[in-house]
């Protein structure tokens, strides 16, 4: 569409009459669509990820590129999702390369990799347990069977430290595009291309898992 991918920071005026379209900061130089742009710790940095499979950390005042993920150890296909830990010390990314990766927020060091058998569209980190959740599935246009198992449309849970799969939750009939833990860690929600938002409450077994 001849539009250069950018990250734009807007100042929000207290009075709507004072609001302008002018951007306080514009970050350029990224190839491909930017799918995620989030604030880093204390709003001193901005973290971006997207179509070029690279995670980047930018200075939020100057727009200067500070760090970017290693191309060999990083994702190999489009990064579709990004979610931070409660204390913002680390964050997780999900990719169409069928993996999710855990990163150190300040150094952009790769900490863990979670491998699955489906493109990952959504990820989140539990605020109370050493658990991460991944969701996605084969594109609906490529699924010819009506069985929900055909496209692998289930949320998969992994131990954050050991990287081992510890369980899964079925229910959607299309790819999962959004996942979020409840702040109390006792439930999570998922949204899919089937048009449903599902709220799942963990049973007692989840809280007694020992690895």
Image (cartoon, grey):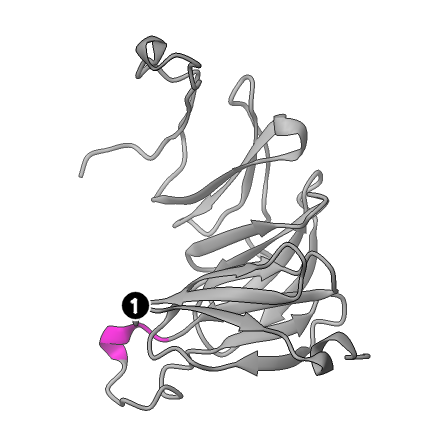
Task: Please identify the quarter of the rendering in which residue 198 is found.
Answer: bottom left
Looking at the image, the residue that sits furthest to the top is: 18
| Closer to us: 180 or 152 | 180
Label 1 sits on a secondary structure element that is loop
Residue 147: say if magenta: no
Q: Does any portion of residue 98 appear in the rendered image?
A: no
Up/down of 161 relative to 169, above or below? above
Residue 139: say if magenta: yes
What residue lies at 27% left-to-right and 82% top-to-bottom? 143
Up/down of 193 relative to 51, above or below? below
User: Exactly how many numbered labels are in the figure?
Assistant: 1
Looking at the image, the residue that sits furthest to the right is: 210
Q: Which residues are magenta?
A: 138-142
Up/down of 102 relative to 88, above or below? below
Instruction: Please give left or right for residue 180 compared with residue 20 in the image.
Output: right
| Closer to us: 100 or 109 | 100
What residue lies at 70% left-to-right and 48% top-to-bottom? 109
Looking at the rendered image, the quarter that the C terminus falls into is bottom right
Looking at the magenta stretch, what is its main secondary structure? Answer: helix
Up/down of 96 relative to 169, above or below? above
Query: Badge 1: few (under 14), some or many (20 or more) residues near its Cα, within 10 Å?
Result: few
Percent across and percent down for residue 15 are 39, 12
What residue lies at 63% left-to-right and 25% top-to-bottom? 44
Looking at the rendered image, the quarter that the N terminus falls into is top left
Instruction: Please give left or right for residue 181 compared with residue 77 in the image.
Output: right
Instruction: Please give left or right for residue 163 compared with residue 156 in the image.
Output: right
Instruction: Please give left or right for residue 37 compared with residue 146 in the image.
Output: right
Percent across and percent down for residue 79 are 45, 54
Percent across and percent down for residue 74 are 57, 55
Q: Which residue does the numbered mark 1 point to in the structure image?
A: 195
């Amino acid at each position: 569409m001849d539009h250069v991918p950018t990250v734009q920071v807007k100042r929000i005026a207290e009075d709507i009459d004072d609001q302008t379209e002018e951007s306080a900061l514009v970050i350029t130089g990224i190839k491909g669509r930017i799918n995620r742009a989030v604030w880093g710790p204390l709003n001193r940095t901005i973290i971006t990820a997207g179509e070029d499979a690279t995670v980047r950390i930018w200075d939020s005042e100057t727009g200067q590129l500070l760090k970017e993920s290693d191309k060999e150890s990083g994702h190999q296909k489009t990064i579709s999702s990004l979610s931070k830990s409660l204390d913002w010390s680390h964050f997780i990314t999900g990719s169409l390369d069928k993996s999710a990766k855990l990163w150190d927020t300040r150094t952009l060091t790769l900490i863990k990799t979670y491998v699955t058998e489906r493109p990952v569209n959504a990820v989140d980190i539990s605020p109370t347990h050493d658990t991460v959740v991944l969701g996605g599935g084969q594109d609906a246009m490529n699924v010819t069977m009506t069985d929900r198992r055909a496209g692998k449309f289930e949320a998969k849970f992994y131990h954050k430290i050991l990287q081992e799969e510890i369980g899964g939750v079925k229910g959607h009939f299309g790819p999962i595009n959004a996942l979020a833990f409840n702040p109390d860690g006792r439930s999570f929600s998922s949204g899919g291309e089937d048009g449903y938002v599902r709220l799942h409450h963990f049973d007692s077994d989840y809280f007694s898992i020992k690895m």
